[in-house]
Image: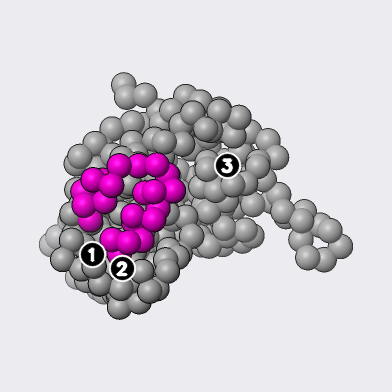
Amino acid sequence: MAAAVVEVSGLSKAYRGRFRGVRRPALDGLDLTVEAGGRVHGFLGPNGSGKTTTLRTLLGLVRADSGEVRLFGRSVPHELPAVVPQVGALIEAPQFFRNFSGRRSLRYLSDVAGLPPTRIDEVLEIVELTDRADDLVKGYSLGMRQRLAIAAALLKQPQLLLLDEPSNGLDPAGIRDVRSLLRRLAGGGTTIVLSSHLLSEVEQVCDEVTIVAHGRTVATGPVRDVLSQATAGGGRVRARVPDAVTGQRVLTAAGLTATTDDGMLVVAGADDPAVVTKVLAEAGIYLSELTPDRVGLEEAFLLLTDDGAGGES
């Protein structure tokens, strides 16, 4: 089994509110484990669910009230200096001097960190900005600035990359570019923790996901397993019958959960699809189609979080 590069256990953090000094919990016993290796781990949750607070805690920018945080087996924040060279991050919106070129921006950051200048050309190639490296940043599109920010995070050749909403505000072409970049980085052995609200994109790029709500972890694991967990009450199937309304009534009377969608029955709670066939046939209803109903990440997300978290992000 691969070693864990991120271990968060029972993490809690409350912020003092604006009125009467009331403390509002941002994190409430959150757990997160990310194993090493070339993978993209999605970190998902509604706005205010604690995602950004968690990432900032990993970087020592926020001190938790309680819980344990470890990076590469080292305690954070006490042993953070020992692992900082292995971690790259993009947590806030990228900020660059607009009258600097992309290359000059990276050279400045490289000099401050004492890194070899040869790394600048390497990261520009990785993020596919070599052809525009000498253009001023003020002429860059939002997508190009995001890629430049990721290039800056890669200067240290990190083993772990923490990204908070890297596709936020991008058009479809920019989102596609970032998605392709993340898969290339993971293919090269980098472990990536990706916080995002773009669920369709996460479903395409992530190997695993952790879903949080109200500052707590509600699901974690490979994407396929999390989708299954969202419908843990039994498999879902779609059935086509001559009269969907009558079929729904019959299935509901048999203890199954049935709804109609575009003239078809959507049935949950049947571990064996043959049960649906049997119940309908005994009522004289014969189906012409029966197929598994795959839950997408967006629907699983809503089912698991109730779309109702609030508080700090």
Residue at the image point whose x is 33% and y is 55% from the top: 107
Whether 78 is drawn above or below 313: the answer is above
Residue sitting farthest toward the right? 20
Q: Tag 3, which secondary structure?
A: loop
Residue extending farthest to the top is 1
Query: What residue is pinned by disc 1?
Result: 133
Q: Which residue is mark 3?
A: 60
In depth, the one of 74 and 220 nearer the eye is 74
Q: Pointer 1: residues within 10 angstroms few (<14), some, or many (20+)?
A: many
Q: Amino acid at mark 3?
A: Gly
What kind of residue is marked 2?
Answer: Ser
Crowding at dot 3, Cα within 10 Å, few <14 / some 14-19 / many 20+, comes out as some
Element marked by disc 2: loop
Q: Position of residue 286 (x, y in %)?
A: 17, 60
Taking the spot 64% from the left edge, 60% from the top edge, the residue there is 311
Which of the 4 quarters of the picture holds residue 300? bottom left
- From the viewer's side, name the closer residue of 90 and 97: 97
Q: Which residue is mark 2?
A: 101
Disc nearer the start of the sequence (3/1): 3
CA–CA distance in space, label 3 to label 2: 30 Å
Say if residue 233 shows up in the picture. Answer: no
Counting from the top left corner in percent of width and height, residue 280 is at: 25, 56
Quadrant the N terminus occupies: top left
Q: Which residues are magenta?
A: 102-124
Secondary structure mostly seen in the magenta stretch = helix
